Image (spheres, rainbow, N blue to C red):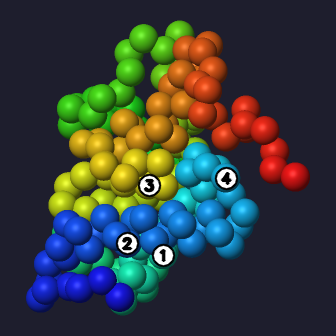
Amino acid sequence: MPEVTGSEIAPEAFRQALQAALEKLQRIEWIDCPARINDGLCNEFAREVLAAFGLQWFERTPELRVLSTKWFYGDDDRTLDLDRLRAEGVPVPDDVPVSDRKLSYELGSVHYWVSYRGRHYDSETMDGVDHFLELPFFQRIVERLRGRVHEAQPDALPMMP
């Protein structure tokens, strides 16, 4: 188990936990790339990172926790509240040629990731990003809505034998 000093998790220990979670899921699930983990096993990835520090699902420390798009939903149960996100300075794209309803529904696809010291991480993002919408999982959705297919899109990748 990586070293936890008091309530602080050392950056190197966190990085090791990310890498160990990635390697474990790739080995157990026979997954050939990190994008595939984000296509159905994102919660398992987050669970593995927490477990590295002796934490259970949705337990948190002052600097480490699991987040989900579910916590950013609007009044209904499947769409993100884009107006609220924009008001908070979130990098919500304005140039996607679809209605806000469609964009918010697509971006509201359930995804789990880890937040550590204010940055956001998942199986594809070992260096973290400032906001969750900058994670590749969400960027692929934005690109798809813009009409461009991202080369690392999991459903565009060849299936493993």
Whole-number angstrom distance, CA of label 1 to CA of label 4: 18 Å
Looking at marks 2 and 4 on the same chain, the residue that comes earlier in the sequence is marked by 2
Q: Amino acid at mark 3?
A: Asp
Looking at marks 3 and 2 on the same chain, the residue that comes earlier in the sequence is marked by 2
Residue at (47, 38) in percent of width and height: 136
Whole-number angstrom distance, CA of label 3 to CA of label 2: 12 Å
Which numbered dot is residue 17?
A: 2
Q: Amino acid at mark 2?
A: Ala
Q: Nearer the viewer, mark 3 or mark 2?
A: 2
Looking at marks 1 and 3 on the same chain, the residue that comes earlier in the sequence is marked by 1
Which element is circle 2 on? helix
Which numbered dot is residue 122?
A: 3
- The foreground one among 152 and 80 is 152
Which numbered dot is residue 32?
A: 4
Badge 1 vs badge 2, beta-carbon distance below 8 Å: yes
Badge 3 vs badge 2, beta-carbon distance below 8 Å: no
- The foreground one among 57 and 88 is 57
Q: Amino acid at mark 1?
A: Glu
**Residue 108, percent across and down?**
52, 42
Badge 1 vs badge 4, beta-carbon distance below 8 Å: no
Residue at (51, 41) in percent of width and height: 137
Q: Amino acid at mark 4?
A: Asp
Whole-number angstrom distance, CA of label 1 to CA of label 2: 8 Å
Whole-number angstrom distance, CA of label 1 to CA of label 3: 11 Å
Which numbered dot is residue 48?
A: 1
Q: Is residue 37 left or right of residue 65?
A: right
**Residue 109, percent across and down?**
58, 45
Which element is circle 3 on? loop
